[in-house]
Image (cartoon, rainbow, N blue to C red):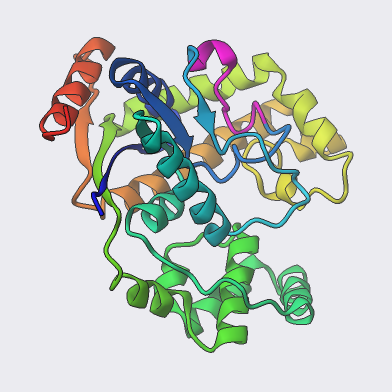
Amino acid sequence: MDKIFLVVVCGPTASGKTKLAVDIALRFGGEVVSADSMQIYKGMDIASAKPTEEEKMGVPHHLMDFLDPREPFSVADYAVLARKAIADIHSRGKLPVMCGGTGLYINTVVDNIEFDDTGSDPAYRAELKAIAEEKGAGYLLEMLAAADPETASQLHENNVKRVIRALEVYHTSGRTMSEQKAASRLNPSPYVPCMMMIDHPREQLYERIDRRVDMMLEAGLLDEAREFFTHTDYPTAAQAIGYKELKPYLDGSRPLEECVCELKRATRRYAKRQLTWFRKDSRIEHISADYAVNYDKIVKNAEKLIKTYSFF
């Protein structure tokens, strides 16, 4: 079977990857497959920086804004849907362009990783949730590190849902996620990936993040967060960067300025974790975006990279 050529535009938040993915799709006749673990949820528009219809410029976007925040959703679920979307785009003679900052989503698809994600134990899951509430998210991550240090090193303690899922998989199957990942690598990937990341100097990226937060607030982030916190059955909202940092202000316990500063710090920390993840992958081509480089040059460098493949 011929492999599918797949462009992957990845990188940290506020790096400009969404705009670049759209421009690539316009130039090469493509469609975008989102690889963002928060953009999948309905209603989380501003906090997850979903592109507007104007920003999409008519380019179809897949796996975005389709899931109720109350619905469970795993990496394995994402991989199934993403592979179907990529195959559909390719079958219509279009170029699939994966775009996002969730490294686990991207690597699971690109490397054809298969998780035995069917095991479920609601009682054990509830026990783990109780432990997290009593002893803290850090304690739960330490539990995972004892059983599966590789997976634990790829997760942040605030990502309680995924830490619990990794522990549940090990509890029900007797195999860690990292063991499953290693075994699944024996199956060759059906893709020829062209992976790229816009590479900003750290301070420049942080400036972009601060501006992004200010723009989100102007666009109505406070109202969006307030609406989500009216739903006690939306556990995703409690974890999402952009909501939890504003909750003290909405509760009346902290001034807005302090909460906004914390939101900017949290977003910068998240970007740092994303950079750590993506810089481990030697396949990713880094497109310079320092202060002297304009956006047109970034697009031209991306085009040159894609054209190095014989597909174009």
- Near-viewer residue (85 or 219): 85
For this orientation, the residue located farthest to the bottom is 174
Q: Is residue 183 above or below residue 296?
A: below
Q: Tell whether 6 sits left or right of 170.
A: left
Q: Residue at x 42, y 77 (%)?
A: 180
Measured as percent of width and height from the top left, residue 165 is found at 61, 69
Residue 156 seen by the camera: yes
- Near-viewer residue (178 or 308): 308
Q: Tell whether 225 sits left or right of 172.
A: right
Q: Residue at x 57, y 71 (%)?
A: 117
Q: Residue at x 46, y 36 (%)?
A: 33
Measured as percent of width and height from the top left, residue 144 is found at 53, 77
Residue 16 seen by the camera: no
Q: Is residue 293 above or below residue 150?
A: above
Q: Quadrant of residue 306?
A: top left
Measured as percent of width and height from the top left, residue 220 is found at 72, 19
Q: What quarter of the picture does the N terminus occupy? A: bottom left
